[in-house]
Amino acid sequence: MRGASLFGAFGTIFAATATCRAVRDHTVNDHLLNVQSVPATSTNETAGGCARRERTLALSDPPYSNYFYSDCNVDAQVVVTSPLPESDLSVIGPRLIIAWPAGNSGVCAYFAPQNGANGTLGIEVVNSTIGKPLAPIYSAAPSDLASNVPQVGVTGVLRFNFSAELTVPILGSIRTIRDFVEGPSLLYPEIQDAILYSQLATGGVSLQRLWLDNVTTTNLTFSAPPGSNGQVKLSGKTVTFTAGDYVFSASYNYPQLTQLTPSEVFKGNSSAIVSQQPDQAYSLSFLSYKDKLLAGAWRFLTYFGRDSMISALLLEPVLSVGNGSAMEAVIGAVLERVNRTDGSVCHEETIGWVDYATWSNMKKNITSTAMICDYNMVDSDYFLPVLMKKYFVDNPVGKHRYQAFSSTTAGKFNAANQNLTWGQLGVKNAERVIRLATPFVQNRRKEDLIHLHEGQVVGQWRDSTFGIGGGRIPFDVNTALMPAALRSIAALARNHIFAEKEWATLADEYARIWEDETLKFFQVTVPENEARKRVDEYTKASHFAGPNQTNIIDSDVQFYAVALDGYNSLSKVEVMNTDDGFRHFLLNTTEQGQLTSFINQTANNVRRTFPAGLMTDVGLLVANPAYGANPVYARNFTTGAYHGTVVWSWQLALMAKGLEYQLGRCTSKGSPKTDTVPDFCRDNVVHNNAREAYHLLWDVIEQNHSLLSMEVWSWIFTDGKFKATPLGTLPPPPGVSGGTGEFVRPSFWTSLTRGALFYSESNIRQLWSLAFLAVARNKSL
């Protein structure tokens, strides 16, 4: 990726200073803020008594420039969008976003050229007089305000190359901003009509909004710096700017989260990561807090159960453990939000707690500021026992922590769980897993496999309209997650974490049946000649510019459908995919013939170049529709689709670690004491195939090192190679309004879940995309 011209190479990190430069706020009419910078002060004299070193980071992903700021008073991300000549101006326009993890809250401002053609306006953040892009805002709460929470935020300098107009301001929740950015430009009168516009005595303009809780206030101001020729004017609700530089300030009075510093995120023996990989280390710190880890910046600055648990499993070798640790923050956040009625795990919380949650409750004629949890995903339930076993059974520190940890009283964040403990909620989740596993154990029928919830189009990590091709029965949940959860419940019972002694044998027996009896429902075998024919037809239909690779198809092609019962009445969604990685990473199966065959087909599909397989120069594609006989596959799984023929960083890590685990079973050093050496280890063809796939995968991972902290990227084929390109720069599948979905539903949870609809830009930093802090090539294999 290109580096920003202002900041040098991609990922340049600004050296942390021992001072916390304060920006004092002067209260004016109605407590509107006129922000001015002041000289640096010592750590003992900083705003609000802040003695923690400030941490800053600048990352470029054109057309987006990202700036992060953290100190002990505020954590913030600023994203500036300035369209490139090749940008699609229908979805990418000049935009300023300030995002705060606390409350998943923020500010968004869209701009347009005042008198010029669309595409002529460019904006950028420039260094101010303090020599950095951002400085903090801190103002103690005036005694006459309902809230005693200080006003905190950030300020910087925004440059316009052309006269501009502020066209759309949004102040409040990131969810509100995403509804506009990613949906059909949704704006809610209850929120927008509450914005107050004022001309400041200094010549600046202020926008202020009181949240629906009647306590929290968000402020956004623009002003020309002293000595500048720039002018910002207000006429009614129209804000205009002449070309030039303007100080922007964004702040709010909302209780802040307690961030884990880089040194607090990592284990003591992994602390060298902070100096060796400062960009990724700070990124993980920015997403890590005492009470939870956040999914991604800027779009997902909130709890996502699946994301945090997968991340913790992959990052486990380096994450801090013990009381107040990152690992316990993850597990505690999940248990806190478990549904006490049925034991299901919360996928996402709706916060901007007192704003978007209040608004969402209002739509149901409920007067409440309580958080709302989405329990519509079916995969999240199964990660919790796996992570609990990983920490409370396998970890030398965690195995001594369960008694104290499990006695924690629930209800601090999820009031619905008051009068329960985290330990009790963990048992409720385990009971759910066993209850849902029982019908298939008894009947071994497709009908008894785990289905998506009725009325939901998404339910696992491929949570977009075409993610699993409309399938109702996902591969990963049934063949990997369910049996892994059952194995973990058995281990937790054997180690007296769960008091239900019968689970020690019952859950293991259930797991064996789910491990051995589910794969057959998803298996796809395409005869060699038919496979060549389908790939050739796909290459032509999709207008793929590279070679069709049919010459490397030298046998029948085997893979496992990403789901069953898909769109167009398809019994199997015949899309080759990377979800094999879950089974390799989470299970040590023992049905030898099945295990050998499964590992061999994974290795074949990893080694073959797309469209014959999953491999490209820029990474392993999460989906390959080339072997699907129905043309609907090629139409829906494209380079512009969120879960199409694209690369996801954490999926690379999952597959790499999964293959490492399986190959490790072939050595006494890598094999658990209870695990006999599998037959595939003695099959030279299969074992060598798996080894070559593992190292080929690592070759491409290392060649794309600069991309690995990104969430997802796509590609173009040019000059005989696959070349990485941002997902948002490519057209979506036909009939889709953006890179991630197809249609609009009025229901919030089904229409606006992450990735489900419309245009979607990738997060510059995603929690699970930081997995390579802990995942590395095992050269001994």
Image (cartoon, helix red, strand yellow):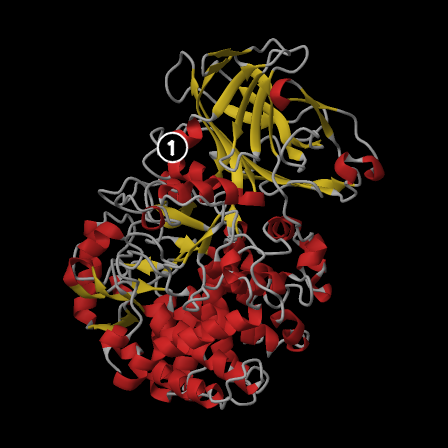
Q: Is residue 58 above or below residue 378?
A: above
Q: Is residue 281 above or below residue 596?
A: above
* SS state under label 1: loop
Residue at 66% x, 58% y is 265
Using the rendered image of the protein, determine whether residue 465 is visible from the camera's viewpoint.
yes
Q: Which quarter of the picture shows residue 362?
A: top left
Mark 1 neighbour density, 10 Å: few (under 14) some (14–19) many (20 or more): few
Query: Residue 430 location, x and y as percent?
Result: 46, 75
Front one among 330 and 435: 435
Q: In this rendering, would 80 be left or right of 600? A: right
Residue at 38% x, 88% y is 592
Quadrant the C terminus occupies: bottom right
Q: In this rendering, would 685 be left or right of 442? A: right
Using the rendered image of the protein, determine whether residue 81 is visible from the camera's viewpoint.
no
Kindly identify the amino acid type of the residue bearing the numbered disc 1: Tyr
Front one among 602 and 549: 602
- Count of numbered tags: 1
Residue at 58% x, 76% y is 780
Query: Residue 464 location, x and y as percent?
Result: 33, 52
Q: In this rendering, would 654 be left or right of 34? A: left
Q: Is residue 113 above or below residue 555?
A: above
Q: Which quarter of the picture shows residue 575?
A: bottom left
Front one among 550 and 318: 318
Query: Residue 423 location, x and y as percent?
Result: 56, 72
Query: Residue 697 location, x and y as percent?
Result: 46, 64
Q: In this rendering, would 83 be left or right of 131? A: left
Query: Which residue in the protein does label 1 denote?
Result: 188
